[in-house]
Amino acid sequence: MFHGGTNFGFSNGKNPPPQPTSYDFGAPLSEAGDPTDLYYKIRNITSKYLPLPPGKPPAPAPKLNERTVELRVICSLKEMLEFFRQNASLVNATSLYPMSFEELGQDFGYVVYTTKIDFQPASPSVLAVPGISDRGYVYTRATTAVLSNDQLATSAPVVVQKGENLTIIVENTGRIDYGPGNKNFKGILSNVTLGGLLLTNWTMEGVPLSTPEQLSLLSKFLTTLNGEPMFEVPGVFFGYFTLPRGQEPLDTFLDPTGFGKGIAILNGFNLGRYWPSIGPQVTLYVPGTLLLPYPNANLVALFEMEAVPEGMKTVRFVKVPNLDGPTPTSIG
């Protein structure tokens, strides 16, 4: 690959594990179109055998000055889903057994699965979801847990009472994009049991973050919110910033360090997934064409599933990407 690129939105593939949003690793030109060290190495080697074009090679494009944006307001997932319900824009269904993303008509993103427990389970009881695809966040009144087929973690102990809801938010982390595995269904693809007893009567609701129309409607909804932040997850954390007068919108990189895992949205455009603690990618590429010039306000939002930083909740726009962050320690 000569020119690196970006898997904006939910368009990243999966190996597995899921591939990162950026795929300019090892490319002579970065995803921002800037020459990398490899570009100059190739140029130098080529010059030993062939004449080079006249003139100097292209220089990196200027980047936006670094800035920090505080995310002061949060919209909980519950609030967001209720807004889309009221606007008749929520994909949803009920079924005796869990439905896949494909059966629901939700190709990407997240689906919320909910059932009411109709028997008294032991405490704790093992929740088994052998068909989870790909990552599941389990919520009861007393328990939160994470499931992942990539990590072979498809069961967890939970505490829940008869008559209470059990919710699993399933994330499609990316589809296998080659070979025999590319028929890659998502969601809960098996029966679910609690303490060995079958759970039935499920409600499925698609989290509306997949299409430009949904993101535009979400951005309009966020601009109406200005209440006291509660900083709960899952939810949307967002804030505003304005470029200086006369500042041309230039390329930049969003750094969400301190947040857990989710997607970043700028002015109604899904920049892609972030997961800075797992890496290796930390920053997300932001083309300057997505930024609004002075005096317009730019809205940056994070749909966060796992964790928020202590103290002030901020993101940074930086000049230099970080695609070589921390990765999990492997055995051996």
Image: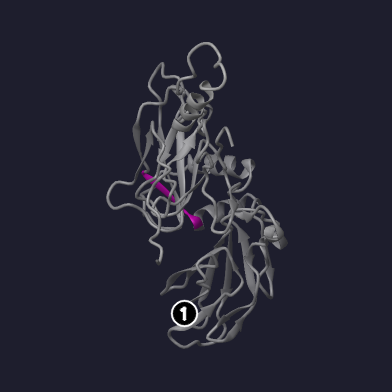
Picture coordinates of residue 2 (x, y %)?
58, 33
Residue 31 x/y as whole percent: 52, 34
Task: Name the residue nearer the viewer: 128 or 6.
Answer: 6
**Label 1 crowding class (10 Å Cα cut-off): few <14, some 14-19, many 20+?**
many
- Foreground residue, 10 or 216? 10
Residue toward you, 285 or 142: 285
Which residue is at the far left? 311
Residue drawn 42% across and 38% down? 254
Q: Position of residue 47 (x, y in %)?
A: 51, 21
Which of the colour schemes (rainbow, by chain, secondary structure, one colour) is used?
A: one colour
The amino acid sitting under disc 1 is: Val
* Magenta segment includes 74: yes
The single residue placed furthest to the top in the displayed view is: 54
Considering the whole magenta stretch, tell me its main secondary structure.
Answer: strand
Name the residue: 38% across, 54% down: 277
Count the numbered circles shown.
1
Q: Which residue range is magenta in the image?
A: 72-77
